[in-house]
Amino acid sequence: MDVELGHPMPFIEEEETEPPSVSAPRVTDTGHATATDTFTNPIANLFDGHRQLLEGDFWRYIPAYRGVDQATFLDHHWQSQHAVTRVDKLATALGDLLPNAFFRDVEAGMARAPMSLRISPYIVSLIDWRDPYSDPLRKQFLPLASEQLADHPMVGFDSLHERSDSPVPGLVHRYPDKALFLALDLCPVYCRFCTRSYSVGVDTEGVSKYHLRAKPERWEVAFEYIREHEQLEDIVISGGDVHNLRADQIADIGNTLLDIPHVRRMRFATKAIAVAPMKFLSDDEWVNSLASVAQRGRKLGKEVVVHTHVSHPREITWITQAATRRLYGEGVTIRNQCVLLRGVNDDPTILRTLVKRLSYVNVQPYYVYQHDLVPGVEDLRTSLGTTLAIEKQVRGSTAGFNTPTFVVDAPGGGGKRDVHSFEHYNRTTGVSVYRSPNVDESAVYLYFDPIEFLPEEGRRRWADPDEHATMISEAVRAAGHDPASLPRGWGASQRRRLPVM
Ligand SMILES: *Cc1c(COP(=O)(O)O)cnc(C)c1O
Ligand code: SF4
């Protein structure tokens, strides 16, 4: 699509140091091993590009933000108040930058989307609106009906079985010594691909959510469970996003957990560093509250860190750098976990730049996730073969401690597994088989590549519902397990966690 913009775009790193993604050596997402052979032509400037952060008042090319000065744009209240939550508001903010057909495409996409719409002005101003169809930031937050694909037959809400692994509402206890505390169900933005779309955000046309509100009474039940389970040393405080907790709530949660003797580590999870970094520059009360918890933890010999979620190098600007510098200065470690997303970061050049740019701004790349089997976002999933090939290109490009581990969060509640640790991977049917002995010694877990990328034979077999159970049996048998006595009907149902014989 060709949209004429009256103003020059300020994306220096895209224009000058990184080639447009169309000519970059992309992974051919066929799911075949040969994908690795397509990267032999590394891009010039690859290792310099990560230091060139977007500078200046880059938001001013958006018609609605033309008159917004720096102090206003850096105000976290202003960012929240001006978050775009409706398509017509987006159209107004963008003025005449885009034709109506684009907004109709978004409206139609929203009607089938599991997540509600919410985009911060910071992100709106980082989208290259000259070509929103291929823009990696647009793809994460704005669905287009013209891009949507049918879900894989094995896709389902809460594919990680978080609710069945929750002894009390909003506390997922799956691993022996760590638990996931879902403190709230609100975020500064809503990501299309959220794995917790069963809960996070406001209800959408198709989905009435399992809400986990920020309620001290509910939290206390979770804290009591943690107190009673001495094996729990590590608590992830997530949701939702702790960005949306008040400063006093951050202090209450942090100090309550620090007071539990066996809790040694905690991480506050927020996407704000990627989508609203001004939170760390203008909400002093909130930052000081977080920093006090971290400093109190340090005195007690306990680790309090921030985990964030940056997907693309363009999300990191001079504002991000100022934000991470402040946290780093307060002694708070920041780690990043992101999802490998088709058309966003499923490209070794982009992912290498992301890893190096994160390291450059004091953020440790921790995980890159295989996209979960969640509904409504099939157009964003990649195959396991793509992930394996990209990992090979990223490892070795920088320090090992800044090299993320690529994981698949095993559907059915197996937890995070190194993508390479599959027991079996059939690139024709796209079925991979994992085990997770620390979670359940007696189960196998299955992941399914997007059907679109499978060779003809695999696509044909998935088109026939009678073949589904057969393909799964084949994979389980090839992984060395006997599928004969598996419960009847498991293949065609939505079960992805199977007992091992
Ligand atoms: C991801 C996750 C954790 C933390 O796992 P790490 O591998 O330590 O990052 C804990 N509990 C649940 C349920 C999780 O999904
Ligand atoms: S910020 Fe995290 S929890 Fe919130 S919508 Fe995005 S992925 Fe989901």
Image (cartoon, rainbow, N blue to C red):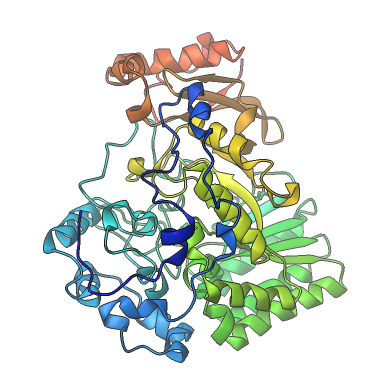
Q: Is residue 316 above or below residue 63?
A: above
Instruction: Measuring from the top left, give residue 283's x and y in whole percent.
Output: 56, 85
Is residue 149 visible to us here?
yes
Q: Name the image quarter holding residue 478.
A: top right
In depth, the one of 144 and 46 nearer the eye is 46
Q: How many marks?
A: 0
Q: Where does residue 314 sit, x and y in percent of width and height?
A: 47, 62
The residue shown at (21%, 54%) is: 111
- Give the percent coordinates (x, y) of residue 486: 51, 16
Please say if 311 is above or below 72: above
As drawn, the residue found furthest toward the left would be: 100
Q: Residue at x 80, y 54 (%)?
A: 230
Residue 127 location, quadrant: bottom left
Q: x, y percentage for residue 204? A: 28, 59
When the figure is inspected, residue 472 is found, relative to residue 345, above or below; the finding is above
Query: Which is more toward the observer, 169 or 59?
Result: 59
Q: Is residue 181 visible?
A: no
